[in-house]
Image: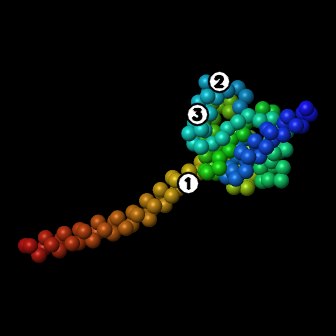
Amino acid sequence: MAKVELKQPVVDEIKGVLDGAQGAVIVDYRGLTVEQDTRLRKQLREAGVIYKVYKNTLIKRAAEGTAFSALNPDLEGPTALAVSKEDATAPARVLANFAKTAPKLELKACVVEGTYYDTKGTQVIATIPSREELLGKLLGSIQSPITNFARVINQIAESKGGAAEA
């Protein structure tokens, strides 16, 4: 069996992971302890992020012809791939938060919704709240004036009711 035939299932697996993905981040994980890696994987799993270590050449081959091929120049050295199909910023957010406690974890680059970002751009992407948080803030900002208006109307009604009784 040729080496290419052995590697093709892994390339197909990576293609499946990248297919329909909203965001993908590549990181250098050298220097992480087993305990740190286990904690990181748990946090990523809870956030719905697929995290796996692949050979760089296989990632390049799987990403050919997609927006994720922009990551090719950064695919050097040990590389782990974190991908999310639902929340585009989740991989960057979880990895950047974890990197604060484990400085050995180095964010290399990311592709979010088809746009490539380098290390600095990935750090900025990591600061963007999740879709649910943004929708919650929007709902709160829409609801706030309505709530304040209702309070004012209620106070006016109470003062008119109180004045009528006197």
Name the residue rendered at 17%, 74% in the picture.
160
Task: Give the total number of marks visible in the rendering.
Answer: 3
Q: Splitting the image into 4 quarters, where does residue 107 fall?
A: top right
SS category of the residue bearing label 1: helix
SS category of the residue bearing label 2: helix
In primary-sequence order, the first of circles 1 and 3 is 3
What's the CA distance linking mark 1 and mark 3?
21 Å
> Residue 49 at x, y = what percent?
63, 42
Name the residue rendered at 56%, 50% in the picture.
129
The relative height of residue 98 versus residue 70 in the rendered view (above or below) is: above
In primary-sequence order, the first of circles 2 and 3 is 2
| Amino acid found under the numbered disc labelled 1 | Arg
The residue beneath circle 3 is: 42
Most extreme residue toward the top, as rendered?
A: 34
Q: Splitting the image into 4 quarters, where does residue 14 fall?
A: top right
> Residue 59 at x, y = what percent?
80, 41
Name the residue rendered at 44%, 65% in the picture.
142
Kindly identify which numbered label has been placed on residue 131: 1
- Density class for disc 1 (Cα within 10 Å; few <14, some 14-19, many ≥20) is some
Most extreme residue toward the right, as rendered?
A: 2
What's the CA distance linking mark 2 and mark 3?
12 Å
- Density class for disc 2 (Cα within 10 Å; few <14, some 14-19, many ≥20) is few
Looking at the rendering, in which quadrant would you find the N terminus? Answer: top right
| Amino acid found under the numbered disc labelled 2 | Val
The residue beneath circle 2 is: 34
The one nearer the camera, 48 or 156, is 48
What's the CA distance linking mark 1 and mark 2?
31 Å
